[in-house]
Amino acid sequence: MTDNPLKNREVIIEFQQIGTIVRVSAMDVKTLTEAIIQGPASTPKPILERNALKKLEYTLKKKGIIPA
């Protein structure tokens, strides 16, 4: 099992339902980098949150902010 690269970072998660879609944003507080995903409102929140965090992790790695 790999270590979580976001473990020591402060991340804000926001859920916003728009009809049958939920918009989830994950923002790294230190760099103000934001990743946004959308999914069906019927999807469990932990899955949507995990997907938003994975996208944020990908974005931070791509920018070279966290090690790949």
Image: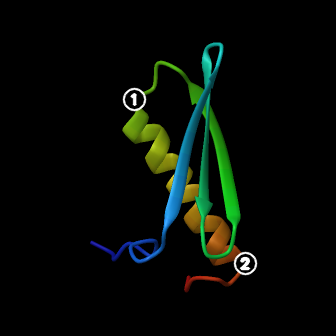
Residues under numbered marks 2 and 1 in contact, where contact means CB atoms less than 8 Å apart: no
Amino acid type, mark 2: Lys
Q: Is residue 34 above or below residue 24?
A: below
Amino acid type, mark 1: Pro
In the rendered image, which quarter contains the N terminus? bottom left
Q: Choose between 66 and 30: the one closer to the eye.
A: 30
x and y, in percent, of residue 56 in the image? 60, 61
x and y, in percent, of residue 45 in the image? 42, 34
Q: Which mark is residue 63?
A: 2
Residue depicted at x 38% and y 40%: 46
SS type, badge 1:
loop
Q: Is residue 68 above or below residue 6?
A: below
Image side of residue 7 versus residue 39, left or right: left
Q: Quadrant of residue 19?
A: top right
* Residue beneath disc 1: 44
Residue depicted at x 69% and y 58%: 34
x and y, in percent, of residue 59 in the image? 67, 67
| Real-space Cα separation, disc 2 to disc 1, in angstroms | 29 Å
Q: Residues within 10 Å of mark 2 (few under 14, many from 20)?
A: few
SS type, badge 2:
loop
